[in-house]
Image: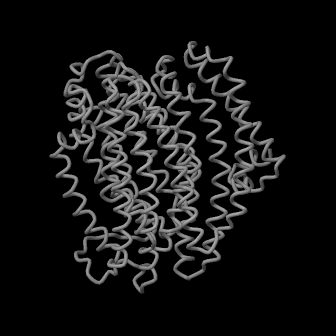
Amino acid sequence: MAAGTAASRLLGFVRAAVLAALVGGTISVGANAFGLANTIPTNLYLLIAGGVLNAVLVPQVVKAMQRPDGGAEYLDRLVTAAVVVLAAVTLVLTLAAPAVVWVFSTQAPSDQRALAVAFAFWCLPQVFFYALYTLLGQILNAKGLFGAYMWAPVINNVVALVGMGVFFVAFGGISADASTQAWTPARTSVLAGTSTLGVVAQALVLVVPLRRAGIRLRPRWGVRGMGLRSAGKVAGWTFGALLLSQATALVVSNVTTSVPGSAGAGNGAWGNAFLLFMLPHSLVTVSLVTAMFTRMSAAAARGAVDELRSDVSLALRTVGVAMVLATAGLVVTADAAGFLVGGFRADQARQLGPVVAVAALGLVPFSATYLVQRGFYALEDARTPFFVQCLATALWVGGALASFALPEAQRVVGVAAALAVSQWAGALAGAWALHRRLDGIEGRQVLQTHVRLLVVGLAAAAAGLAATRPLGGLLDRGIPGAVLLAVVGGAVVVAVYAAGLWLLRVREVQPLLRRLPGPLRRR
């Protein structure tokens, strides 16, 4: 799973860099407009189906598979109903593209919003295919088949990159100071259309492993008698939490789109910063928790609280090892990473770098919250995560709105700071609530591990910054300089962090090392 995620994320960075080079960097009207239109489908999918499918589907399918038919009728009815509903909702959203874009960009310049609407007509159908991808993928996960779900996004990125190649051959690049008039209908349709085609491929490719697993889905109408009433209670609370998270996304979108392309980091830069932020979370936390969620759900169904408690504790400590290292690495290499994914422009990299570094401070609690939520979902309790989400939402929304008071060039940094603060508050509240629910999650051991990791992480970050600050001028030497800066900073951080783990005997690193290829593990 981690290998598939790594391949996908690597191609994702290549995709982001190529896109930035095509449209004039992350700080341009084209980047901001396309970034908005291509992000809205993800937000709407999460609101409509994403979290509900993730939270509810695996426990229900695991139960259904205990039936005499192995859950075949249940899956047929579930998929049929979901496809019909999602198709209808996606059609309505696509037809309402101007209104949808306005809601997410009320403070944006009018010409930028108009361009985003043109992109959105091509991008909004992604809602259906993202949901279909999640639906089919979670069926595979419930059967213990995790790899295909993580590898499918690779195809998405490949298709999108091919589309960008077609764009470049047909039209060339667009300069950073180009107006919206440069975006003809042909350019708009090629860029946005191939982006959507990638999501289509990502969803449909999962049909192959489903058939190999013996799952033959066919249309079957009716949902009565499926036992969805109890699941509906979980789904209701999950949907409430999603409303809160999407309210946050709505506010963040309006704050970041309020920054004109020439004024500093806007929503295009925020999208790339969040891409960097999500990389370690996706590589480690999502891969680990996706596998453990099925086991946690099975333990909860058997009433094996001790097993569930042990799984949560081990996952919190193991994920912490990787996320503290990632935080230190992102803080140190923020400018270099911003250069490599932000259109290869030193001036834009120095505006993107602070956003990446500040957001990275929320990475550890972000991953911890993700894990704690799955602990509650395994217990079919979505009510408690909802109230935890209320706290995090209030803090992030309040901080994002307060960022309007900052100069335009600093607003996105304010959003990143609000993210970090909100995630720490949410993670602590969620862990405390799960501790009470399970009568402990080995809290003392978890706390001791994280304190040691904090000490080691601070030392690694300090050493990395000391090594890279004198080398900041390398960004002005183009890609080789940025790569060298990233390598130096990353090497120092990893070396100091590894030494610190050894000195403080942080044994939770062992589960991660066992996942490395043999030669690396022996080192």
Looking at the picture, how far across and down is residue 51, in whole percent? 39, 59
Q: Is 419 located above or below residue 444 in the figure?
A: above
* Point 77% across, 42% down: residue: 498
In the rendered view, would you say 351 is above or below 518? above
Q: Quadrant of residue 174?
A: top left
**Residue pictured at 49% horizontal, 29% vertical:** 341
Q: Residue at x 41, y 75 (%)?
A: 60
Residue 478: x %, y % from top left = 55, 16
Name the residue at 70% across, 41% down: 457
- Expressed as whole percent of the image width and height from the top left, the position of residue 423 reads 51, 49
Q: Nearest the camera: 503 or 207?
A: 503
Q: Residue furthest right?
A: 503
Q: Is residue 318 above or below residue 400?
A: below
Decide if residue 204 is in sight here. no
**Quadrant where the N terminus is found in the figure:** bottom right
Residue 366 located left or right of residue 445: left
